[in-house]
């Protein structure tokens, strides 16, 4: 059982705005709440890795408006409020005895009734460095209900940039034999190939501003060590030593396909000796941008993948989102009722905008626009594939060079350098190593989310609805 000290004052007591509040009228209250919270923090150090946390009550209120309002208020009054450090999330009420927190010390905290209480308990534990798991119990409510709750809780952790596994008890012992098919969909140049490269930890696929991916590329692993990468296409097999060799080969093929589109319609199968650990259970499928005009419509090829998928990874371009073309392919995937995760890519571009934006605001804005169009069952994870790919190419030695010198001509390094500069200028944050730079791309986080959603028994709910064959 939880003790009084384990559940610290709820965040709702810190910043408590119901959805009925008119934000402008209550600006003063918001500010007072923040001050109180800051004082409270400095005394008790109830912080998440040094970050402040605000709490927004009411599932129908807009996180986006909330953060905007806080931002405007802080500027008007010349008070520095670092929005990057200022997390926010909606409150969620839990049915009684449904949610418990396992904090890694053989102690389950039960009777948690809402999201702010759950977070309070986690943050108290975080200071003691426990490993947490949230366990949902189907004793009193249906598994379908809990799957929806699970997705909501996971989305809150995404806003908070925390990874805490959320598990429905009894539903994680699936002995699934086959690999799940992770189908990467989206419009042209959203960054699908870049996201796959970042997830696989190598530049396998050409990712370019001009050259489109003209057909499906299906990546599998064969788990045989010392094997080379190989490609099968139209009965021909070719071997490659390095991901870049495959990329160069594909590049030539894609150029050919652009000149003569009929040359590359059939799927290309790529076998990789070993995927990163967390991707072991998957086959990953790259698809052409759905709105690219080709000989055989790229839309048809992308749509043909929709029927094959277990999990859709829908890559959206942060800088050009929710176009008519995008909604068309999103809708086609959404109707299939399988697990759908949106990778909101290119979030590095928010730093080039005039307005300082925040990670959670970007995600919440897209979520509310999709909700308004009638789409509810999805998760959004903001990522920057190019940041992750660039960081993977930067060695510790390079890192010393580009932090000290301006003379850089390597593209990956100059991209990385720009990101580091943006973080410093916008947030006053210093990124100290290639690993922490890679972390800001959030690709590993995306992989954890995909993994956690895949690790359940298939049943009829949307977020665990895999093909049965
Ligand atoms: N700034 C930025 N650029 C990115 C990011 N991800 C991809 N890009 C760039 O966007 C362009 C298109 O990326 P691709 O990976 O080829 O996009 P795609 O969705 O596979 O494109 P198609 O296959 O043509 O549909 C490339 O120039 C990438 O370098 C990112 O996170 N940030
Ligand atoms: Mg591509």
Image: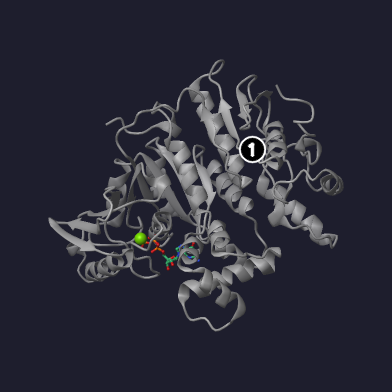
Judged left or right of residue 270, residue 90 is right
> What kind of element bears circle 1?
loop
Ligand 2 in which quarter: bottom left
The reply to whether residue 419 is visible in this rendering is yes
Q: Quadrant of the C terminus?
A: top left
Tell me where residue 373 appears, x and y as whole percent: 51, 43
Quadrant housing residue 298: bottom left
Q: Residue at horizontal 69%, vertical 37%?
A: 125
Tell me where residue 393 appears, x and y as whole percent: 45, 67
Q: Which residue is mark 1?
A: 130
Q: Residue at horizontal 63%, vertical 30%?
A: 105
* Residue 393 versus residue 49 in the image, above or below: below
Camera-side residue of 247 and 383 = 247
Judged left or right of residue 18, residue 281 is left
Q: Residue at horizontal 42%, vertical 54%?
A: 199
The reply to whether residue 330 is visible in this rendering is no
Tell me where residue 103 appears, x and y as whole percent: 63, 32
Q: Quadrant of the N terminus?
A: top right
């Amino acid at each position: 059982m939880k003790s009084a000290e384990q559940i610290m004052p709820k965040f709702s007591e810190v910043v408590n705005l119901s959805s009925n509040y008119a934000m402008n009228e209550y600006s003063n209250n918001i500010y007072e709440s923040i001050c109180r919270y800051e004082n409270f923090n400095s005394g008790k150090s109830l912080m998440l890795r040094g970050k402040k946390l605000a709490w927004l009550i009411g599932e129908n209120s807009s996180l986006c408006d909330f953060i905007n309002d806080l931002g405007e208020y802080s500027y008007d009054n010349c008070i520095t409020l670092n929005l990057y450090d200022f997390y926010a999330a909606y409150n969620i009420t839990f049915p009684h005895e449904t949610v418990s927190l396992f904090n890694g010390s053989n102690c389950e905290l039960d009777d948690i009734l809402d999201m702010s209480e759950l977070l309070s308990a986690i943050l108290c534990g975080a200071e003691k460095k426990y490993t947490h798991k949230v366990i949902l119990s189907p004793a009193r409510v249906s598994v379908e209900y809990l799957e929806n709750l699970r997705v909501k809780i996971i989305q809150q952790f995404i806003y908070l940039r925390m990874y805490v596994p959320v598990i429905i008890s009894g539903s994680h012992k699936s002995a699934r034999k086959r690999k799940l098919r992770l189908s990467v969909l989206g419009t042209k140049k959203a960054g699908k190939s870049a996201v796959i490269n970042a997830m696989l930890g190598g530049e396998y696929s050409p990712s370019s501003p001009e050259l489109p991916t003209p057909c499906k590329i299906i990546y599998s692993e064969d788990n045989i060590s010392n094997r080379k990468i190989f490609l099968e296409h139209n009965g021909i097999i070719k071997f490659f030593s390095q991901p870049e060799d495959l990329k160069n080969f594909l590049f030539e093929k894609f150029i050919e396909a652009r000149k003569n589109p009929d040359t590359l319609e059939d799927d290309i199968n790529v076998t990789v000796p070993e995927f990163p650990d967390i991707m072991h259970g998957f086959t990953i499928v790259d698809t052409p941008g759905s709105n690219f005009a080709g000989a055989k419509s790229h839309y048809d090829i992308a749509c043909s993948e929709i029927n094959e998928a277990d999990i859709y990874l829908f890559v959206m371009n942060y800088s050009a989102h929710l176009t008519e073309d995008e909604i068309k392919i999103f809708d086609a995937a959404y109707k299939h009722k399988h697990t759908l995760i949106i990778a909101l890519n290119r979030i590095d571009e928010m730093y080039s905008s005039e307005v300082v934006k925040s990670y959670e605001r970007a995600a919440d804005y897209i979520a509310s626009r999709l909700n308004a169009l009638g789409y509810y069952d999805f998760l959004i994870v903001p990522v920057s594939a190019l940041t992750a790919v660039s960081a993977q190419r930067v060695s510790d030695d390079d890192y010393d060079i580009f932090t000290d010198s301006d003379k850089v001509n390597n593209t990956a390094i100059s991209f990385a350098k720009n990101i580091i500069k943006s973080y410093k200028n916008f947030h006053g944050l210093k990124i100290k190593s290639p690993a922490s730079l890679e972390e800001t791309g959030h690709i590993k986080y995306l992989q954890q989310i995909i993994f956690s959603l895949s690790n359940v028994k298939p049943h009829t709910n949307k977020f665990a609805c895999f093909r049965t064959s």
